[in-house]
């Protein structure tokens, strides 16, 4: 329940409905959370599967933030996804912007 990041398995139909990952996220940071929000909103919710998980190693959050000049922009975009989760129409509008996965 406290997972900050995710591994998502989605049916092809849902992948197509959300248009995949939002390429406005540049580099590492928040792209998975935005994708999860889009899938949850347009797919009707998420189902968590219990059990162990292994996480691929990558730079820690603070290290990446210092090395990725786009980290702040990625976070702002994620916050827009977070805020759109309550409304299917808002989520589609966000994702339909120029450069978005449906745009």
Image (cartoon, grey):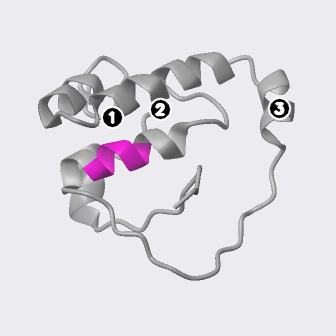
The part of the image, by quadrant, that contains residue 52 is bottom right
What separation in Å lies between label 3 and label 2 (alpha carbons)? 22 Å
Could you say which disc has been placed on residue 23 in the image?
2
Q: Is residue 103 left or right of residue 37?
A: left
What separation in Å lies between label 3 and label 1 (alpha carbons)? 27 Å
Q: Earlier in the sequence, mark 1 or mark 2?
A: 2
Residue farthest front in this picture: 1
Give the main secondary structure of the magenta stretch: helix
- Nearer to the camera, 35 or 79: 79
Dots 3, 1 in contact, CB < 8 A: no
What separation in Å lies between label 1 and label 2 (alpha carbons)? 7 Å
Residue identifier under label 3: 62
Could you say which disc has been placed on residue 68 in the image?
none
Residue identifier under label 1: 101
Dots 1, 2 in contact, CB < 8 A: yes
**Image coordinates for residue 45, horizontal then vertical, percent:** 25, 57
Picture layout, residue 93 above or below residue 43: above
- The verdict on residue 44 being magenta is no
Q: Label 3, secondary structure: give it.
A: helix
Q: Which residues are magenta?
A: 35-40
The 10 Å Cα crowd at callout 3, few under 14, some 14 to 19, many 20 or more, is few
Q: Residue at x 28, y 37 (%)?
A: 85
**Image coordinates for residue 94, horizontal then vertical, percent:** 27, 24
Q: Label 1, secondary structure: give it.
A: loop
Location of the C terminus (image quadrant): top left
Q: Label 2, secondary structure: give it.
A: loop
Q: Residue at x 28, y 19 (%)?
A: 97
């Amino acid at each position: 329940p406290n997972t900050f990041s995710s591994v998502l398995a989605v049916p092809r139909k849902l992948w197509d409905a959300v248009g995949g990952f939002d390429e406005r996220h540049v580099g590492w940071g928040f792209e998975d959370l935005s994708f999860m929000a889009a899938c949850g909103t347009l797919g009707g919710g998420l189902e968590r599967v219990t059990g162990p998980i292994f996480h691929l190693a990558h730079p820690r959050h603070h290290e990446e933030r210092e090395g990725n000049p786009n980290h702040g922009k990625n976070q702002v975009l994620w916050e827009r996804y977070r805020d759109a989760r309550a409304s299917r129409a808002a989520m589609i509008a966000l994702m339909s912007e120029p450069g978005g996965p449906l745009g």
